[in-house]
Image (cartoon, rainbow, N blue to C red):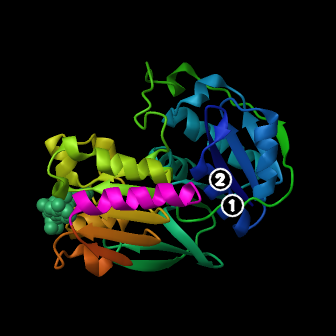
Amino acid sequence: MQLVLVELINGKCKKTALEAVAFAAKMGETTALALGTASADTLQALGAYGIGKVLHINNEKLNQVYSKAYTKAIAAAATHVGADTVILSHNSTGRMVAPRVAVRMEAALFAGVNELPGNDTIRKAVFSGKAFADLQMSTGKKVISLNPNSYKAVAGTGTASVESFSVDFADSDFDYAITGVEDEAGGHVPLPEAEIVVSGGRGLKGPEHWGIVEDLAKALGAATACSRPVADIGWRPHHEHVGQTGITIKPTLYIAVGISGAIQHLAGVNQSKVIVVINKDPEAPFFKAADYGIVGDAFEVLPRITEAVKKLHAGA
Ligand SMILES: Cc1cc2nc3c(=O)[nH]c(=O)nc-3n(C[C@H](O)[C@H](O)[C@H](O)COP(=O)(O)OP(=O)(O)OC[C@H]3O[C@@H](n4cnc5c(N)ncnc54)[C@H](O)[C@@H]3O)c2cc1C
């Protein structure tokens, strides 16, 4: 029996939560644990992803992540339903909470999992995404954190039952104060959840040229990202930095503009389904990792692609 954590944002299930739910349901009978405020309809809809029952702690304090409170809630729910396996997303919440849950349950931790190739076998990327390792899970109790965008959540039919659940929280479970939350994505699709990402590098020469990246992203409904030096120089905010020392993403389509393709950059993006590289240097290393490459000047190529996408959307 599994327990999966459903993270909520503004009363809705996060995309990463739906991925974790679908992944867990594929492993077998799963109960979901939802923390924070959400409507019954939202939680019942998890049935479409293979969930029979949802335990709901309807406590608005849990709309923010408190690692101690989350750990306590997850461990209590796992005991309540007799779950030997806990599954959650390997996002910032999962990275913070999964090890704590594993300690509390005396379980093995399988962090940053990509796939489930067989019964009790998980696959994860190793060596900065250059290889995959298959691990046989031989422990009775396990905590698995699933890499965002690794598993596609496809809705079927079905309705889950929702049961109210409570845990005795102490004040010390909420041992820091979250005084405000800033939406860094400015209302746009958050980078880790984006299906399409347009990313710019030092080849764009300055922050004043980012309009061409944003125009293409807007036309495609994509998020924007950047290489590390671009964030380091302050051309773009740090939350857009992808790579070994930044965010790891796995969108369906990654468009890299004016990025050389250093190994540290590739580590964060090389699991993208389709990679398109636009670079004026035909010898740029990124072309080796690309599915499609355009050798050309970004300042000429990008506006033309944006125009073509707009025409396509307009049905012209
Ligand atoms: C420990 C460590 C960790 C690191 N972590 C990261 C990380 O997480 N993420 C990351 O990105 N980097 C990381 N780096 C840095 C990495 O090694 C590279 O230096 C960096 O990715 C290069 O950024 P860039 O491709 O934007 O710039 P450059 O290497 O300067 O490449 C610019 C590219 O733009 C092309 N170009 C120039 N003009 C045009 C034009 N008009 N049109 C089209 N193309 C053009 C050039 O041909 C070139 O290929 C790390 C480095 C170290 C040592």
Dominant secondary-structure state across the stretch colored magenta: helix
Please name the residue that numbered disc 1 is placed on: 22
Is any part of residue 228 visible from this angle?
yes
Q: Dot 1, how many residues are within 10 Å of its Cα: few (below 14), some (14-19), or many (20+)?
A: many
Viewed as shown, does residue 241 lie left or right of 187? Answer: left
Please name the residue that numbered disc 2 is placed on: 18
Q: Is mark 2 within 8 Å of ligand 1?
A: no
Q: Give residue 285's mark.
A: none
Q: Are marks 2 and 1 in contact (CB under 8 Å)?
A: yes
The amino acid at mark 1 is Ala
Viewed as shown, does residue 158 lie left or right of 276? Answer: right
Q: Quadrant of the C terminus?
A: bottom right
Q: Is mark 1 within 8 Å of ligand 1?
A: no
Instruction: Name the residue rendered at 37%, 73% in the picture.
Output: 126
Q: Secondary structure at mark 2?
A: helix
Instruction: Name the residue rendered at 83%, 38% in the picture.
Output: 163
Q: Quadrant of the N terminus?
A: bottom right
Q: Quadrant of residue 27?
A: bottom right
Q: Position of residue 124 (x, y in %)?
A: 46, 71
